[in-house]
Amino acid sequence: MIDQNTKTVIEACAQKSHDGLITFPEVLGQLVGVGVQSYFVDYRLAFTTYYLNSNEAYQIPTEMPTLPVRSPFKKEEMISAIRRAQGDQVRYPEFLRLTMLAGCVGYMVWITGKHVTYFGAQGETHIEHFPGQ
């Protein structure tokens, strides 16, 4: 059973991200602190599922921009959005918009594996290793 503190930290990270108040490294630090091993952001269903070290999962609704995900997957635009986020030139709300416009339908953050896999609607992928990895 996932304890209330873990749920509270996950929900607070998600809200702060969507408000543009926290960076990706800050999110990772807080999630690791409560035992999150990975998480999946599904743009089409507007949910994020967090997977814990205990083999439990916790799913919450995710605010998404009100624009359609475009196809095909535009890898160069994805990489540009990622670099802008890494450089703190954009925060999460704008990152979501940019990646959706690039044809992304969701992504999986592998915290323990230190990379993110981004997905296109036709099975395309882009793997982005954490900076310094």
Image (cartoon, rainbow, N blue to C red):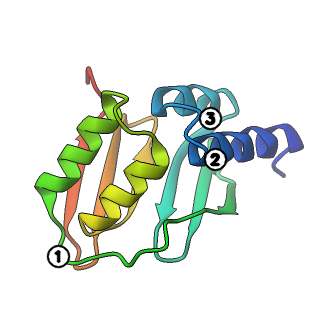
Find residue 82 and report its image quarter. top left
- Describe residue 24's horizontal placement relative to residue 62 as left or right: left
Residue visible at 19% across and 45% down?
80
Residue indicated by mark 2:
14
User: Which residue appears farthest toward the left when viewing the image?
Assistant: 76
Crowd tier of the residue under label 3, counting other residues whose Cα lies within 10 Å: few below 14, some 14–19, many 20 or above: many
Lower position in the chain sequence, tag 1 or tag 2: 2
Residue indicated by mark 1:
72
Residue indicated by mark 3:
31
Q: CA distance from mark 3 to mark 1?
A: 32 Å
Lower position in the chain sequence, tag 3 or tag 1: 3
Q: CA distance from mark 2 to mark 3?
A: 10 Å
Horizontal and vertical percent position of residue 64: 53, 65
SS category of the residue bearing label 3: helix
Crowd tier of the residue under label 2, counting other residues whose Cα lies within 10 Å: few below 14, some 14–19, many 20 or above: many
Say whether marks 3 and 1 touch (CB < 8 Å). Answer: no
Question: What quarter of the picture does the C terminus occupy?
Answer: top left
- Describe residue 132's horizontal placement relative to residue 2 as left or right: left
SS category of the residue bearing label 2: helix
**In the rendered image, the vertical position of residue 109 relative to residue 102, given as above or below:** above
User: Which residue appears farthest toward the top when viewing the image?
Assistant: 132
Lower position in the chain sequence, tag 2 or tag 3: 2
3 and 78: which is toward the camera:
78
Residue visible at 34% across and 46% down?
116
Mark 3 residue type: Leu
**In the rendered image, the vertical position of residue 78 relative to residue 113, given as above or below:** below
